[in-house]
Amino acid sequence: MQITKTIFTNGCFDILHRGHYELLKYCSSLGRVIVGLNSDSSVTDLKGPTRPFFKQEDRIFALLSCRYVDEVIVFNENTPYNLIKSISPDIIVKGGDYVADRVVGSDLAEVRIFNFIDGYSTTRILEGQ
């Protein structure tokens, strides 16, 4: 009997693009995927007054429509530390701009870094690049 691991990733997921889907696909290859989604207010705090581009309910719908995502949990803080602590995932996955030992929750679970897919960035998309 194989035990399924719980995989956690998080972010704003404001405009889903190939880079997001590749990250989520990678997560799914490791186990059951829980996405911690920044609330609208935390996205605004992190990204500025013009964000999020899509409201929380739409971002939840888009993520849950992706076959690689098993569950979405919204959090209001600027970091998902308390959520990670309550979920106790086996693995935390973050994108290539992170360093494993500096990832929020690295003291609570194994961290894996997924290399970015070149040319995909929500900020760049919104800036028309």
Image: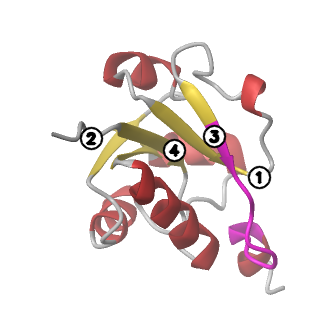
Who's the residue at 28% across and 64% down the image? 64
Q: Is residue 19 left or right of residue 6?
A: right
Circle 3: residue type: Arg
Q: What residue sits right under mark 4 in the picture?
A: 10
Q: Is residue 114 left or right of residue 68?
A: right
Judged by depth in the image, the label closer to the viewer, 1 or 4, is: 1
Instruction: Measure how far apart labels 1 and 4 are at the Cα level.
Output: 13 Å
Color theme of the render = secondary structure
Numbered disc 1: secondary structure = loop
Q: Are marks 1 and 4 in contact (CB under 8 Å)?
A: no
> Which label's residue is closer to the chain start, 2 or 4?
2
Q: Is residue 82 left or right of residue 12?
A: left
Task: For the N terminus, give its image quadrant.
Answer: top left
Q: What residue sits right under mark 3 in the picture?
A: 112
Report the span colored magenta.
112-123
User: Where residue 37 appears, x then y in whole percent?
Assistant: 44, 46
- For label 4, the crowd category at 10 Å Cα-Cα, with few meaning under 14, some 14 to 19 and many 20 or more, is many
Judged by depth in the image, the label closer to the viewer, 2 or 4, is: 2
Q: What residue sits right under mark 1 in the picture?
A: 96
Q: What residue sits right under mark 2 in the picture?
A: 4
> Which label's residue is closer to the chain start, 4 or 3?
4
Q: For this rendering, which residue is in front, 52 or 63?
A: 63
